[in-house]
Image (cartoon, rainbow, N blue to C red):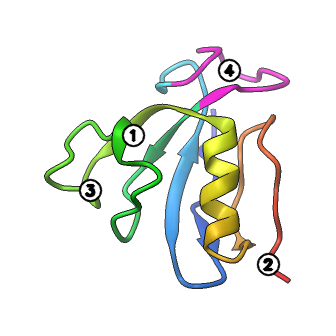
Amino acid sequence: MKLNKTILCADGFSMSVQARAGAYCTPRVDGAERYTEVEVGYPNRREPLLMEWAEDPSGPTETVYAWVPAERITLVVAKHGGIIEGELPPGIAYLPAV
């Protein structure tokens, strides 16, 4: 299964958001119609809205964030001005930059 392209937000914040059988997500299957929790990886800077899911909080840009609620991804994207480019798993609102 292909990986989603990294999300780039209007203010320069970026992160990988994945959901598939091998990822920390719900449901943990390939090709679901909707994911309620997803895996975030390697944001380019520390994001307080994600820290409670960090696998290694001491290295916030070098870690994976497991089972992050879909709604939290939407909040992070909104905080950073919307999406300029990248892909999200099904079930997460895609908020384009204005």
The circle on residue 60 is 3
Which class describes the residues within 10 Å of circle 1: few (<14), some (14-19), or many (20+)? many
**Extreme residue toward the left, this view:** 58
What is the crowding at mark 3: few (fewer than 14 residues within 10 Å), some, or many (at least 20)? many
Label 4 with label 2: CB-CB less than 8 Å: no
Specify which label sits upstream in the sequence, 3 or 1: 3
From the viewer's perspective, is residue 92 above or below residue 76? above
Relative to 16, is 91 on the left or the right?
right
Residue 40 coordinates in the image, percent (x, y): 48, 45
Residue at numbered disc 4: 30
Verify whether residue 95 appears in magenta. no
Image point (29%, 61%), residue name = 61
Q: First in sequence, mark 4 or 2: give its number.
A: 4
Determine the secondary structure under disc 4. Answer: loop
Mark 4–mark 2 Cα distance, whole angstroms, equals 28 Å
Q: Which residue is mark 1?
A: 65
Above or below, 46 against 21 in this view is below
Extent of the magenta region: 25-37
Q: Is residue 5 visible?
A: no
Distance Cα–Cα, label 3 vs label 2: 24 Å
